[in-house]
Amino acid sequence: MDQADLTKISSNDGATTVAPSYAYSRVKRIYDLILALAILMMSLPVLVPAVLLNTILTAGRPVFIQRRIGKSAEEFGLIKLRTMRRPKNDEYWSHRTDVDDTRVTFFGRVLRRLYIDELPQLINVISGQMSMIGPRPETLDTAQQISESHPRFVERNLVKPGITGVAQVFFRKPESDMDLWRRYYYDRIYITRGSIWFDLKITLRTIAMVLRYKGT
């Protein structure tokens, strides 16, 4: 699709239009780069030891790359620090985790609690695959499954996925596919009303939630 096609998607329930003046603007890209680079530089004293400890304590690769759906439904490799043990034999794992998920390692729980496992996604932002603010990217299987019963779910691909967003700030951690679909309504707010001021607001709220350990 070209940019004109991406500004609007029609479905049985109507149409959603992106705020194109901001969604594709240099202002948003500059905001993403400045914020991502600043956070990455400040987090290096924590991130580097975390990578080393994750390698030593979990006896495996410290970084986990998972295929996710980005803007225009293009797949990309989302980068995170690995927080789970390695699968045994031919185990099939769902990408969704529970509060007491036994697959998560002890050190992985520490990384998740402090949100350190999310920091490598700043590289995705710098490379242009993600934005700081936007809908969270889903796996291809999840996106296809939800889109079969809720076609408007694909509208989340109108903009770049984000590290944080409206759904992360104002909705709970998803525990089912229905929760992921409900998040669409929060994401739609950002898709249709995105602006630099909206990004600043979500950024500040996310920082406050991280400091209080209440992120989703």
Image (spheres, rainbow, N blue to C red):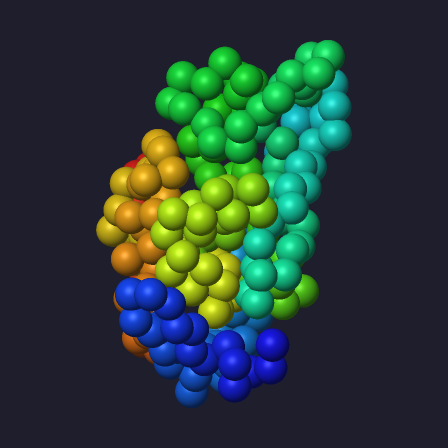
Taking the spot 30% from the left edge, 71% from the top edge, the residue there is: 14
Q: Horizontal and vertical percent for residue 150?
A: 37, 52
Q: Is residue 44 visible?
A: no
Taking the spot 29% from the left edge, 65% from the top edge, the residue there is: 13
Q: Nearer the viewer, residue 20 or 32?
A: 20
- Residue found at the far left of this picture: 170
Taking the spot 48% from the left edge, 69% from the top edge, the residue there is: 159
Q: Horizontal and vertical percent for residue 35?
A: 50, 66
Task: Pick the quarter of the image with the C terminus.
Answer: top left
Q: Is residue 21 visible?
A: yes
Taking the spot 73% from the left edge, 12% from the top edge, the residue there is: 89
Task: Pick the quarter of the image with the N terminus.
Answer: bottom right
Q: Nearer the viewer, residue 185 or 99?
A: 185
Please indicate whether residue 214 sits to the left or right of residue 95 in the image: left
Q: Horizontal and vertical percent for residue 63?
A: 69, 37
Q: Horizontal and vertical percent for residue 8?
A: 42, 78
Query: Is 178 situated above or below 196?
Result: above
Please indicate whether residue 185 sits to the left or right of residue 110 in the image: left
